[in-house]
Image: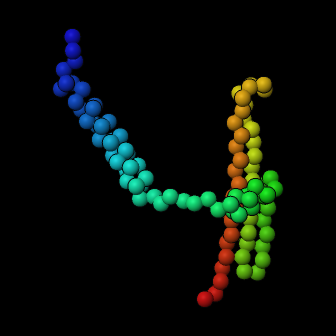
Amino acid sequence: MPLPLAAIAPVALRYGLRYGSVALATWAVARAARTGTRDQKAEDALDRMPEGMTARREPEQGNATLRLRRVLRRRPDGPGLEIDLAALGRFRIRKV
């Protein structure tokens, strides 16, 4: 016997509005986002960074780097997933 639509309408309306608004917001953000470019010099600088965290402080600015490389495997002999996280940071204070 088919389900009457009146019984599932509140559930469908509630989830439809919730997920529909999330889908609409995602679509709007995707449309507004600009396409980035890849800077090969920046990529090379990130590849040359040592693993771990470094920090340096100068009179007008502070610099920090972070690199974390890990390989995740389900089994010791199985396929893996390599994660390479690299970040550069700069904090600068100047009087103008």
Percent coordinates x, y for residue 75 in the rendering = 74, 25
The residue located at (78%, 73%) in the rendering is: 57
Farthest residue to the top: give it: 1
Q: Is residue 26 visible?
A: yes
Q: Is residue 60 left or right of residue 34?
A: right
User: Can residue 53 be seen at all in this image of the molecule?
Assistant: no
Q: Residue at x 30, y 37 (%)?
A: 16
| Image quarter of the C terminus | bottom right
Q: Would you say 6 lies left or right of 87 here?
A: left
For residue 87, which quarter of the picture? bottom right
Query: In which image quadrant can residue 66 be found?
Result: bottom right
Residue 70 in the image: x percent, y percent? 75, 42
Q: Quadrant of the N terminus?
A: top left
- Taking depth in this image into account, of 41 and 79 the one nearest to the observer is 41
16 over 33 or under it: above or below: above
Q: Which residue is at 72% across, 29% downward?
A: 79
Q: Residue furthest bottom?
A: 96
51 versus 62 height, above or below: above
Identify the residue shown where x is 38% and y is 49%.
27
Query: Residue 60 sits in which quadrant?
Result: bottom right
Colour logic: rainbow
Q: Position of residue 84 (x, y in %)?
A: 71, 47
